[in-house]
Image (tube, rainbow, N blue to C red):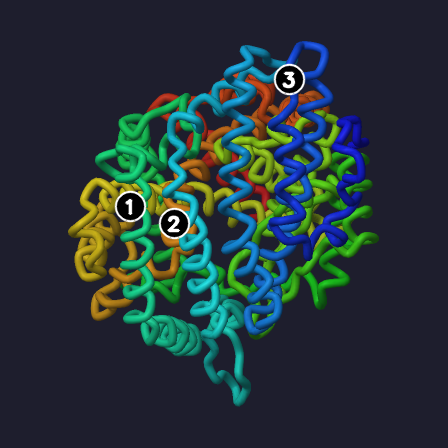
């Protein structure tokens, strides 16, 4: 975005985040003061917002690049030092000044075009803001970094080599049940070794979050966090109704899948190490030999969905905006993050050669294309999209790419393997919703029972109760410690509280987008792109409607989605026989 705001004489912001990276607060604050001193009017508003956007973009991209630097190498002490400096010296005062500018805009009574949602969010932020929370929010980010460091250092010895726990994942697909069990027990055993360290860190997270809520005059962190996440289109009660609908509609469907798997495997009971192997005894799908092949084929698939998506991914490759392989001292998981100044996304993941890696890249690709599609929006705030729809962008892409997984369409697999991959994906959607309900229900309990939940043992008990309600078909006998500490292994619970129900809502939205594509693929993709291009300028229900879906998560909508999924799986199975 070109600079149009007239800064004070002698002041100029750099054009890139790299040139801004080492600025201290003394150099940054005068630009905030310039913005604060403007007499806002209808004529001055757009230029003023452009100046604020330029400054906000530099800060956000700096923050994002520092996060990436610590994620790609958790042992990089220099990167960690820079990140800590930002959290200590830049993050709190910049948030304070952002709040002052929000208040200034609100007090002016002015609002630019397509800014109603942002105006509402700013009003909420102004009411929630407390200066005393700024250092606490910085401390929370430090705890997040500490969690990454614990998990990033988890390695085991397998076949005479030191490997990360993530690198054991291919073994879970081995047709040798004894080998799967050995690898599973080894990996979870290593994770259990950090049980005390994670519980200690959890107490710190909980203390910080309790104080954040108290400072903002909220009796519980749930109410505070709900407001912080701008959840205006649904309530905690809606989440409970969603979980109940999942228990009624999806758990029986998941049970059917598990019973089918148990029969195909010929085992008396399904154990945790029986869930990733192919139930018909086929070797695991091996879609790519190296990251280069993964990128080449993914680009071809994106091109098939829409040539613009292929072009976007090619740009990311050319500009080295991908870090895809797994290695020691790399943070776990996968994510897409936006570099706001460059108007570019960056994809981070941990590929080890599995179909899951393909799905992760297609998923993060959807997030990345969202960044490209919103580049036309003039103001930083308009590009902030609630995860309830941001995840529709990613999950829809997983499904929209499914017709092109076969090699004759430029994909990874033979036609039979592509059908197998789609069946696994569709079954995975059904199996995911109950797991999501466990994670979401756990978080609601945690922050409505703060004192009890500060004790890791109590958390273990609640997780186990929820697990038994929503995940009844897998046999964890003799593995009680491993089962009840599952919350340790779900990073969202620790790092981004309440960020998980969005996946369940968005998955339901994505299935609806996919359903539309089954009858009119071209129009379904176009509707999807139109919704992405709106950014955060309209409400969640309107975003879903534009994409061709309904923002609802009740028994009726779930039933239609599950019926479509089961029908498609049945047809795919028939065609393969």
Q: Earlier in the sequence, mark 1 or mark 3?
A: 3
Location of mark 2 (residue): 136
**In the image, is residue 14 above or below residue 49?**
below
Q: Residue at x 65, y 50 (%)?
A: 62
Distance of label 1 from label 3 (alpha carbons): 36 Å
Location of mark 3 (residue): 39
Dot 3 and dot 2 residues touching (CB under 8 Å): no
* Closer to us: 497 or 559: 497
Location of mark 1 (residue): 211
* Closer to us: 316 or 353: 316
Instruction: Name the image quarter holding residue 56.
Output: top right
Within 10 Å of disc 2 (Cα), the crowding (few <14, some 14-19, many 20+) is: some
Asked whether residue 456 appears in the rendered view, the answer is yes
> Secondary structure beneath disc 3?
loop
Q: Position of residue 396 (x, y in %)?
A: 59, 35
Q: Position of residue 549 (x, y in %)?
A: 53, 21
Q: Position of residue 228 (x, y in %)?
A: 41, 34
Distance of label 3 from label 2 (alpha carbons): 33 Å
Dot 1 and dot 2 residues touching (CB under 8 Å): yes
**In the image, is residue 109 above or below residue 371?**
above
Asked whether residue 300 appears in the rendered view, the answer is no
The disc at residue 361 is none
Mark 3 vs mark 2, foreground winner is 3
């Amino acid at each position: 975005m070109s600079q149009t705001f007239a800064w004070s004489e002698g002041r100029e912001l750099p054009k890139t985040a790299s040139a801004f990276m080492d600025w201290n607060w003394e150099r940054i604050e005068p630009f905030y003061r310039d913005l604060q001193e403007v007499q806002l009017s209808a004529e001055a508003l757009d230029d003023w917002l452009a100046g604020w956007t330029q400054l906000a973009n530099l800060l956000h991209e700096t923050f994002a690049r520092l996060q990436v630097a610590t994620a790609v190498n958790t042992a990089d002490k220099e990167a960690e030092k820079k990140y800590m400096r930002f959290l200590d010296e830049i993050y709190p005062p910049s948030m304070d000044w952002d709040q002052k500018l929000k208040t200034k805009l609100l007090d002016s009574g002015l609002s630019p075009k397509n800014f109603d949602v942002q105006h509402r969010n700013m009003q909420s932020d102004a009411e929630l803001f407390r200066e005393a929370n700024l250092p606490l929010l910085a401390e929370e980010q430090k705890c997040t970094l500490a969690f990454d460091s614990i998990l990033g250092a988890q390695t085991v010895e397998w076949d005479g080599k030191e490997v990360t726990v993530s690198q054991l994942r291919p073994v879970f697909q081995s047709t040798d049940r004894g080998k799967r069990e050995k690898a599973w027990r080894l990996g979870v055993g290593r994770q259990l070794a950090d049980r005390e360290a994670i519980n200690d860190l959890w107490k710190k997270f909980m203390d910080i979050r309790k104080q954040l809520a108290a400072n903002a005059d909220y009796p519980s962190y749930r109410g505070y966090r709900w407001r912080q996440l701008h959840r205006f289109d649904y309530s905690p009660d809606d989440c409970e109704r969603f979980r109940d609908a999942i228990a009624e509609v999806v758990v029986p469907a998941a049970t059917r899948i598990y019973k089918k798997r148990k029969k195909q495997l010929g085992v008396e009971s399904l154990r945790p190490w029986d869930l990733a192997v192919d139930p018909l005894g086929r070797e695991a799908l091996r879609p790519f030999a190296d990251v280069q092949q993964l990128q080449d084929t993914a680009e071809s698939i994106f091109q098939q969905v829409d040539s613009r998506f292929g072009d976007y991914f090619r740009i990311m490759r050319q500009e080295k905006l991908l870090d895809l392989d797994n290695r020691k001292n790399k943070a776990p998981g996968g994510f897409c993050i936006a570099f706001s100044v460059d108007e570019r996304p960056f994809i981070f993941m941990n590929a080890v050669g599995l179909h899951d890696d393909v799905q992760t890249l297609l998923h993060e690709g959807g997030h990345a294309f969202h960044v490209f599609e919103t580049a036309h929006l003039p103001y930083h705030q308009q590009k902030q999209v609630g995860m309830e729809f941001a995840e529709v962008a990613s999950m829809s892409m997983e499904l929209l790419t499914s017709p092109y997984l076969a090699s004759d369409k430029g994909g990874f697999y033979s036609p039979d393997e592509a059908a197998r991959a789609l069946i696994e994906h569709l079954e995975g959607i059904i199996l995911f919703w109950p797991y999501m309900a466990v994670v979401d229900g756990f978080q609601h309990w945690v922050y409505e029972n703060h004192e009890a939940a500060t004790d890791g043992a109590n958390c273990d008990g609640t997780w186990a109760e929820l697990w038994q309600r929503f995940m009844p078909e897998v046999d964890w006998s003799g593995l009680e410690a491993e089962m009840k500490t599952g919350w340790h292994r779900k990073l969202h619970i620790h790092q981004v509280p309440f960020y998980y129900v969005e996946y369940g809502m968005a998955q339901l939205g994505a299935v609806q987008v996919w359903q539309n594509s089954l009858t009119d693929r071209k129009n379904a993709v176009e509707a999807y792109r139109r919704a992405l291009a709106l950014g955060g300028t309209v409400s969640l229900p309107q975003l879903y409607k534009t994409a061709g879906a309904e923002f609802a998560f009740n028994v009726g909508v779930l039933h239609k989605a599950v019926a479509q999924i089961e029908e498609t799986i049945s047809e795919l199975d028939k065609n393969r026989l």
